Amino acid sequence: MVVAGACLATYSPFLISHRRCLTSPSPTSRELLLVRATIRRSAAVSTDGVSTSISSEEGRLVNGNGYVADAIPTKRISEELEDTKKKEMENQRLCLKDFFDRANDMIKPDGGPPRWFSPIECGPPLANSPLLLYLPDSLMIFNVWCLHIPVMDRTPFTDLVQLVERTIRFENCRYPNRPIYLVGESVGGCLALAVAARNPDIDLVLILANPATSFNKSQLQPLIPLLELMPNELHFGIPLTLSLMTGNPLRMVLELAGKGLPLEQTIGELSEGLASLSSYLPVLAGILPKETLLWKLQLIQSAFSFSNSRLHAVKAETLVLSSGRDQFLPSQEEAERLHRTLPKCEIRLFDECAHFLFWENGVDLVTIIKAASLYRRGKSLDYVSDFIPPTPSEFNKISGTYRLFDRAVSPVMLSTLENGKIVRGLEGIPLDGPVVLVGYHMLLGLELGPLVCRVFEERNVLLRGIAHPMMFMRLREGLLPSLSSFDSYRLMGAVPVSATNFYKLLSSRSHVLLYPGGMREALHRKGEEYRLFWPEQSEFVRMAARFGAKILPFGVVGEDDIGEMVLDYDDLVKIPFFKDRIEGLTAETVKLRSDFNGEVANQAVHMPGILPKLPGRFYYLFGKPIETEGRKKELKDREKAHELYLHIQSQVESCMAYLKEKRENDPYRSLLTRMVYQATHDSTAEVPTFPLCDSDN
């Protein structure tokens, strides 16, 4: 992964924060220096504050549950998440201070041209990792090189383009089947676009953070002539840079308050942080003397002209990261322009962030790349072999979005042991894969969040969902929500529905979450609650038997307590406006099961009209696992496979019938009684439910 990160300041904080910069042995040499860090065979690395040990030779996923084998913690996930929070809180205070402390050593003239260095703090890369040129920490999934431009260097933009160009051509010759990632911030974004335009035949992935391709609309652009005439005593570069770095002061206060520290400590840290900024002014003066600032602005102007004139030639995959509080450039407006101009371009918005996006707490570039399904090791993306499991920090952010909903519906999780006994909790879910969890899809898929998060927390198992292609691609832009709406699903391992992906997941011994009813079940009509819409063919049974997978039927009830459907598909298609919208939405997605008959083939995309009610409670029951090990020959017979398919269907229906009957005896089924219980007990206490007795088993 190659990154070019030139901005107003000479260095990105991520470059400066690394322990070592490998310099050129010959200061006068203009040859490209390619440096690779020497890495021990097995090294201790830190990923988002959680220490793990990973073999750099193996670097692969094992056990089928979505974890790197050596990285599996011995503690519960909840304990790891708490440790991660504490370590992140400790580390966040040092980011800006570390930047300035280490900048003191790097702003000295070193006499060399722009060149690459490999930051050792990124950790050892996994096997066959693609190259990334310039990036922040926690990048062991990439082989990272950073572009270093010395303070006093005045290399023209065209020469920088040629430097990066020689690098990617050299790397492409070495590994022609691997992509190369170009990550550019501000003027670095222009550099990445220029290189991509000149090399359309090389497999590049561009990550552009607030690219300076809109510099003509910047407030600084008209100031270049003024700066040329301004005396050194009136130099405004330092306060300008300081304001860009500090961003929104209110956000600083909110972030400190969100740490949950005592009031005195919060006020003390805020005062200390603001006061310390004044001590960094001498360092800023060294980074941005008037001559350097003027040259940087002229460099950006040259980069803007060069890259914009060649946008039509860019064919690479592109992800534009856009800040909403960018005081330097109109970044969100520019992101929309690039999205319309470039053929394979996506956008991710960061509404509360300032221009220097990678300086912001909570912005993790690796997480963004993974969530956008842009991480791959080969010519094309493999959703199974290229998948990198979520870190505890990533999972904590995802599960946090479901906390309020989880608390409102207070899900009851029941599972069945091998002896047939029903117990509260998820003990009955097998740990060893492959396992296929087959169940009922609630209205709008409301059961997914609590289901995936609870299984991950309690069983240390990642469910790889077979999902609709609309979460991964569009046939055309239009009315559907942006792809970024589904980032959390992709980050947690969802894959597009296909026989190939199902095969690969089973072969990797994964836990696969499968809904045979698909969209038709999740968008059911009035009066169709808890009715299965499964295909007539036994789609998955023979494939599961081929790998000896356990099949785990499960049922869910509860969404009829959440809302009342007032307008379903049959109502909407009678209204011309909504009929046109449904046709437009459906045309934007890949059509599934078009060769099927019956209701399951009706995959029209629409949003039913739902009248919310006070949240009821969700109930989950996982049935007894059905073994297919040793039945491969038997289940090759279509009739035998179909018999098992019907048995699985009946088990799902039985689970739902059990839950509908038992929930009538739950004293905490209503929201009010649960709120009273939660208010009078510890916040971590689980709300009781109906009693389980021997007659249930």
Image (spheres, rainbow, N blue to C red):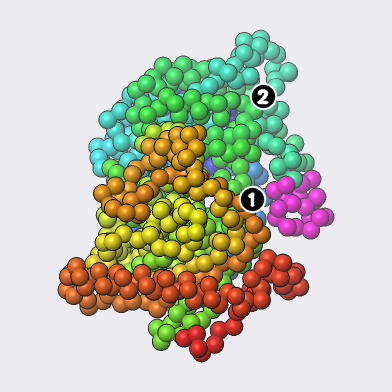
Q: Earlier in the sequence, mark 1 or mark 2?
A: 1
Number of numbered discs:
2
* Mark sitting on residue 324: none
Numbered range of the magenta stretch = 254-273
Q: Secondary structure at mark 1?
A: helix
- The crowding category of the residue bearing disc 2, from other C-alpha atoms within 10 Å (few below 14, some 14 to 19, many at least 20), is many
**Secondary structure of the magenta portion, mostly?**
helix
Q: Which image quarter holds the N terminus?
A: top left
Viewer can see residue 688: yes
Question: Mark 1–mark 2 contact, CB under 8 Å?
Answer: no
* Mark sitting on residue 237: 2
Q: Amino acid at mark 1?
A: Gln
Where in the figure is residue 375, as x and y percent of width and height?
39, 46
Please, which residue is most extreme toward the bottom here?
694
Position of residue 456 in the picture relative to residue 238 (left or right): left
Please, which residue is most extreme toward the right here?
264
Q: Nearer the viewer, residue 644 or 120?
A: 644
Where in the figure is residue 48, as x and y percent of width and height?
53, 55
Where in the figure is residue 252, as x and y percent of width and height?
71, 43
Q: Amino acid at mark 2?
A: Gly
Position of residue 185 in the picture relative to residue 249 (left or right): left
Q: Is residue 547 above or below residue 398?
A: below
Residue at the (73%, 57%) spot, across then down: 260
Q: Is residue 91 magenta?
A: no
Q: Name the image quarter holding residue 105.
A: top right
Where in the figure is residue 34, as x and y percent of width and height?
36, 38
Q: Please name the residue that numbered disc 1 is placed on.
A: 92
Q: Secondary structure at mark 2?
A: helix
Of tags 1 and 2, which is closer to the observer? Answer: 1
Residue at the (26%, 76%) spot, across then down: 629
Position of residue 85 in the picture relative to residue 184 (left or right): right
